[in-house]
Image: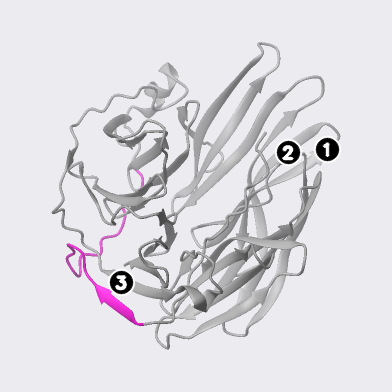
Amino acid sequence: MNKFIKICLLLTVMLVSACSERTINTKDNIEQKQSSISLPENKSEFMKKSDVMFSDDKATLSSQENDKLILPFKIRTYDLRRDSVEGVSVAPEYVNEDIIAFDTLDAKEEYSFVGTYNKKSKVYKKIYVAPKGKITNSLTGINKSLYWVEYDSGLNNELHWSIIAYNLSSTTKKIIKSGITKNETDPPILGVSNGHITWIEYDFLNEKVISKIVSYNPTTGKEEVIAAVELDESNGRNGVFFASMNAVDEGFIVHQSIFDKINSTKKYRVSFYPNQNNTHPLHLLEKDRVIDYTLGGNWFVWTEEGAIFIASLKDGRIKYRFDSESRKLTNDTPVIKNNFLFYRYAINQIFVVDLNTGQRMPISSNQTLTSKLYKSGRFISFALDDDEKNKDVIKMYVLE
């Protein structure tokens, strides 16, 4: 079962010095809408032959490096003075038209807080400080509201958590859900899909663990269970456990562990629950050591140590594969915008791939610390932090 979630330390953003704008090999005014997912015409026949869509590692098309790749996006750069956020590392977890928001942990002072930065007035504001013994994590947002998870900081068998909604206009907060997780299972990690807040939640019934995909509608205040599975842990493990999830515009991608007590087997599967028909998931991949994954338009992407795979949902084939310089370093947080894929290599650099051509180039230099990528509607964001070369400033980037 998943180890207790590591504190997502240092994921945050703000800025206090000059906020400049620059464009890196970009074209303006080419904002295309993602097309709806188109599955293979022979999907039903294909799924009879195999219960997963992608079963090998071979790419059908060649890929190449192109340092002059043209991107149809603006990249806005913000310089954040480190002392404005009390010296902690930061990353832009949520971005809208007006603000950049983050939550972070001050490890020295041992407290968590949430802050916002107004992109127009350049004013930084600390809007919330967690009570002693609590940690904030997994911040996201929809329009004028922020959402984050708050949970116990101690490594206890029972972990109490709450999901908090914060209204940026009225500066009021409320708890929309609370619960308990046990036996080193993770508290909720929030995502956004189709205007809803989403997370995985666990119920513990005797020696059974029930995993649920939950979708919360901010407009109505109602929640819906999208899917639920059961893992029986009495006298061995038998059943299914939802380990992690990535919410995307089109639905929910779930990484699950499947235990068969009779045959003494365990396998890992990545499945997609589309918003339009979430009662019939599409099983995409069965493979050990998958690190991260995403889906957008007609593309499915997953990462492993030393490699990233880009597959087409139209024909069920892997189109491109990029091998890293080191087989031991990870690729993670893949994000798709229009027909471009962005992802992080190790914790040092951001790459972009043109999905139409298979051409790839870095869009950031190799830094001491590069944050994860975050997607907030039409915005993609990340931060570069090289305290050896620049002790005073953290670079924040927003693609739009």
Tell me the residue that label 2 is attached to.
210
Tell me the residue that label 1 is attached to.
205
The image quadrant that residue 393 belongs to is bottom left
Residue drawn at (76%, 20%) of the image? 236
Tell me the residue that label 3 is attached to.
76
Q: Are marks 2 and 1 in contact (CB under 8 Å)?
A: yes
Q: Is residue 399 left or right of residue 171?
A: left
Is 80 included in the stretch rendered in magenta? no
Q: Earlier in the sequence, mark 2 or mark 1?
A: 1
Query: Split into 4 quadrants, where in the image is the C terminus?
Result: bottom left
Q: Measured from the top left, where is residue 94 in percent x and y?
A: 48, 67
**Label 1 Cα neighbours within 10 Å, binned few <14 / some 14-19 / many ≥20:** few
Mark 2 falls on what kind of element? strand
Q: Are marks 1 and 3 in contact (CB under 8 Å)?
A: no
Camera-near label (2 vs 3) is: 3
Q: Measured from the top left, where is residue 197 in percent x and y?
A: 58, 60
Q: Earlier in the sequence, mark 2 or mark 3?
A: 3
Marks 2 and 3 sit apart, C-alpha to C-alpha, by 43 Å
The dominant secondary structure in magenta is loop
The image quadrant that residue 244 belongs to is top right
